[in-house]
Image (cartoon, grey):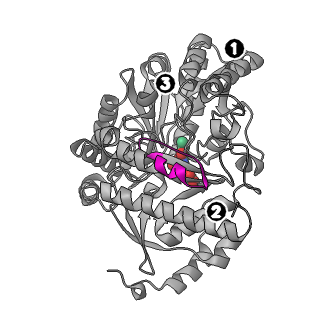
């Protein structure tokens, strides 16, 4: 067992506050409250420097799909680093793990997707997307097709292109984003924005906004539409069934490239290898990252369809784009081992037919709690919408986000890591989670709801 005195928590926290600028963090609040120092992880479990054990309901940050502490990946990385830790893929050079990984990804991806451009993260993948779609249309003799349409409350990364493609208003508010040439339409968030429409009616209405925007901008000016098959960071927004077929129709009709951002939905999260398989999207480009290496080593990529590759590879001369770490051999070795584990342990099938349905049944049963307006889950990605009263979707907590954060903090204290988005709680556990661990996760989630409910009752924010 971990001993808290092995890690000098107070000293580490002081150094953390003095020197380490954390991502997406309110620095004053962090310095006031002190950070939690994670020191060890195994399977679905995390330990902090004070010896507390927590169930990792978020698979790290939607990425440790094969579970923490996989020695096989450490061994593969060790072996690769001993042989060739790094070399680049510029100047007509390459390396064996990157080649094997590209070949493997082509085999796993939908039929019409057979190539990959490697990079270091999901954000870099989406920077690549922006450059590649514009390059594609220029090569096709349509250089005016420059604009990418995305959605409000989408998340596509934190670089300038990633944050611009994303639809997060607070991110746009810092630093004058989005950059020109990127516009945003309605998201298919029925629970929050569907009004009096049925989910199916709303799905069509939200999708048709794409068609309206294409007409407003002019077909000759629109390069692509980008979207996550299921929005992750935006709050696990699972679109109504009518949404994707209508989007597909609109993209095909107007000759707009469809980009499915698979950074979260890729690698088994939905019970298929890709969210695009789950929804039958047939996208032109698929940014990937996270689960590709199960979060062990940073790596991303853009999977490229034959339609785009035939132009970029077939007609193009040199695409002036690439990263020092494109096709990094050590990262590729981690990815190959991750994919080998996924196949050996049949993790995708497991999510589709075993642990997925098991968890969905238990998770959605939390919908009976007085605090829960909707409990939704596909594969192993889900959310609970917290509301002050039932059955209405119209009643919400004000100000938005306070109750979500309160519940998230209570959940941490109970030993379950969930993520809060607005006033919802998000879950996306490692795909290796056992049935007993699902039972424990759901027990802790219900405990969190009960404790939150009592706290809100004491504050007069819900009916007694
Ligand atoms: N696309 C999607 C769909 C993502 O979810 C990125 C791109 C960017 O990937 P990188 O590797 O550059 O971070 C992401 C990342 C959250 C959270 O709080 C989600 C992400 C990143 C950080 C925080 O839910 N998703």
Comparing 37 with 175, the one in front is: 37
Pick whichever of labels 1 and 3 is earlier in the sequence: 1
Disc 3 target residue:
283
Separation of disc 2 and disc 1 at Cα?
44 Å
Magenta region: 364-381
For label 2, the residue is 405
Provide the secondary structure element on which disc 2 rests: helix
Q: Left or right of 137: which side holds 65?
A: left
Tell me the CA gap for discs 1 and 3.
20 Å
Q: Who comes first in sequence, dot 2 or dot 1?
A: 1
* Position in image of residue 148 (x %, y %): 65, 28
Q: Residue at 65% x, 70% y: name it.
A: 455
Disc 2 vs disc 3: Cβ atoms closer than 8 Å?
Answer: no
Q: Is residue 424 magenta?
A: no
Label 2 vs label 3, nearer the camera: 2
User: Where does the image place residue 193, in percent across and percent down from the top left?
Assistant: 70, 37
Inspect this view and state whether residue 50 appears. yes
> Which residue does the numbered mark 1 point to in the structure image?
220
Q: Is mark 3 within 8 Å of ligand 1?
A: no
> Which corner quadrant of the image does residue 137 belong to?
top right
Residue 450: % across, % down: 55, 65
Discs 1/3, front: 3
Q: Is mark 1 within 8 Å of ligand 1?
A: no
Q: Residue at x 46, y 27 (%)?
A: 279
């Amino acid at each position: 067992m971990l001993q808290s005195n092995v890690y000098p928590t107070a000293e580490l926290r002081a150094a953390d506050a003095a020197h380490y600028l954390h991502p997406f963090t309110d620095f004053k609040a962090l310095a006031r409250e002190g950070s939690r120092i994670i020191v060890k992880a195994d399977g679905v479990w995390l330990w902090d420097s004070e010896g507390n054990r927590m169930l990792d309901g978020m698979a790290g940050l939607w990425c440790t799909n094969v579970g923490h502490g996989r020695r096989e990946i450490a061994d593969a990385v060790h072996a690769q680093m001993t042989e060739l830790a790094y070399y680049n893929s510029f100047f007509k050079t390459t390396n064996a793990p990157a080649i094997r990984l590209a070949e493997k990804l082509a085999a796993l991806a939908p039929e019409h997707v057979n190539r990959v451009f490697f990079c270091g993260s999901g954000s870099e993948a989406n920077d690549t997307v922006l450059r590649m779609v514009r390059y594609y249309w220029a090569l096709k003799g349509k250089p005016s097709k420059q604009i990418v349409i995305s959605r409000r409350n989408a998340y596509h990364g934190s670089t300038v292109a990633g944050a611009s493609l994303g639809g997060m208003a607070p991110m746009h508010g810092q630093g004058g984003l989005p950059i020109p040439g990127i516009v945003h339409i309605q998201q298919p968030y029925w629970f929050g924005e569907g009004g009096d429409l049925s989910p199916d009616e709303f799905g069509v209405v939200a999708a048709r906004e794409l068609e309206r925007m294409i007409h407003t901008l002019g077909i000759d000016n629109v390069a692509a539409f980008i979207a996550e098959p299921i929005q992750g960071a935006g709050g696990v927004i699972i679109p109504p069934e009518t949404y994707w077929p209508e989007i597909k129709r609109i993209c095909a009709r107007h000759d707009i490239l469809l980009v499915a951002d698979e950074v979260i939905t890729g690698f088994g999260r939905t019970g298929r290898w890709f969210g695009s398989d789950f929804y039958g999207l047939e996208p032109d480009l698929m940014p990937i990252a996270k689960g590709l290496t199960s979060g062990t080593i940073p790596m991303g990529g853009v999977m490229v369809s034959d339609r785009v590759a035939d132009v970029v590879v077939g007609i193009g001369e040199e695409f002036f784009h690439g990263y020092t770490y494109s096709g990094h051999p050590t990262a590729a070795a981690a990815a190959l081992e991750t994919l080998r584990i996924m196949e050996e342990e049949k993790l995708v099938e497991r999510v589709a037919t075993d642990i997925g349905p098991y968890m969905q049944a238990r998770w959605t049963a939390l919908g009976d709690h007085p605090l829960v307006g909707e409990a939704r889950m596909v594969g192993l990605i889900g959310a609970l919408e917290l509301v002050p009263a039932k059955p209405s979707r119209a009643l919400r907590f004000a100000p938005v986000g306070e109750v979500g954060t309160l519940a998230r903090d209570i959940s941490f204290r109970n030993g379950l890591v969930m993520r809060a988005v607005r006033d919802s709680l998000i879950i996306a556990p490692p795909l290796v989670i056992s049935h007993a661990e699902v039972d424990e996760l759901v027990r802790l989630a219900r405990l969190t709801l009960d404790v939150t409910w009592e706290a809100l009752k004491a504050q007069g924010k819900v009916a007694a």
